[in-house]
Amino acid sequence: MKGKTIFLGILGLILVAMIGAFAYYGGFTKISPEIIQCGGETLVYEKMTGDYAQSAIVSDRVYQNLIDDHGIETTKGFGIYYDNPKTKEKSTLRSDVGCILETDFDKLDAIRADFEVSEYPLGEYLVAEFPNRGMSSVILGIIKVYPALERYVEENGYESDTPVMEIWDVPNKKITYRKQLIKRG
């Protein structure tokens, strides 16, 4: 009887720890997409073809190069994902991955020698936010946010196969998702 009680106690502790971790990484966060006027950021990036799971490696490479070669430290990374991984082969997925430049705009010419540089278009986007507390938040965000964005566009007459931008805001500990909006014709 004592062994059974200990086993149930340990099982209970594991369950509480799992629920706590799920909550900490954003598992209980309510996703409320809304249309917001935004954009205008200066993007420094590499074009990437292949599995979106490689985004962190590319983002880190851009970040480190900006520090090492240009003396610029950024606080926001991003990925713009052009293809739906449910309908395209992983090896053909297209994205732009890098950092958002918030200072040192006088160094853009030198940066262009190493990376692509562009300004993200101003416009109305479908936007949702999610906590960023590590890789588990990124995974939970994919699981929770993308379906909420898809539901919104389907229910409101927008195209579903449009690019999504993720902004990984380190100081504010959040991930912002922006979906391009195009009305169905």
Image (cartoon, helix red, strand yellow):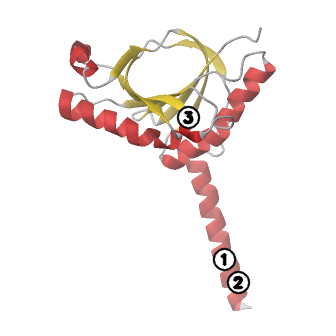
What residue does disc 1 label? 9
User: Nearest the camera: 50 or 41?
Assistant: 50
Q: In this view, does 117 lie to the left or right of 127?
A: left
Q: What element carries label 2?
A: helix
Residue at figure coordinates x 67%, y 81% from the top left:
7
Q: In this view, does 25 lie above or below 79?
A: below
* Mark 1 or 3: the one toward you: 3
Q: Tell me what residue is drawn at x 39 percent, y 34 percent.
A: 171
Give the residue type that dot 3 points to: Thr
Query: Which residue is drawn at the image coordinates 57% and 45% (left, top)?
Result: 139
Location of residue 145 in the rendering, given as x and y in whole percent from the top left corner: 64, 34
Q: Distance between the residues labelled 1 and 3?
A: 49 Å
Report which residue position mark 2 lands on: 5
Q: How crowded is mark 1: few (under 14 residues within 10 Å), some or many (20 or more)?
A: few
Q: Which amino acid does label 1 sit on?
A: Gly
Quarter of the view holding residue 130: top right
What's the distance in space between the residues labelled 2 and 3, CA to CA?
53 Å
Please rate how many residues cluster around mark 2, counting C-alpha atoms within 10 Å: few if below 14, some from 14 to 19, many from 20: few
- Towards the viewer: 97 or 37: 97
Label 2 vs label 3, nearer the camera: 3
The residue indicated by pointer 3 is 92
- Name the image quarter holding the N terminus: bottom right
CA gap, disc 2 and disc 1: 6 Å
Going by the numbered disc 2, the residue's amino acid type is: Thr
Callouts 2 and 3 close, C-beta under 8 Å: no
**Residue 182 placement: quadrant:** top right
Identify whether 120 is placed above or below 138.
Answer: above
Residue 94, image x, y percentages: 52, 29
Q: How crowded is mark 3: few (under 14 residues within 10 Å), some or many (20 or more)?
A: few
Q: Is mark 3 on a helix, strand or loop?
A: helix
CB under 8 Å between callouts 2 and 1? yes
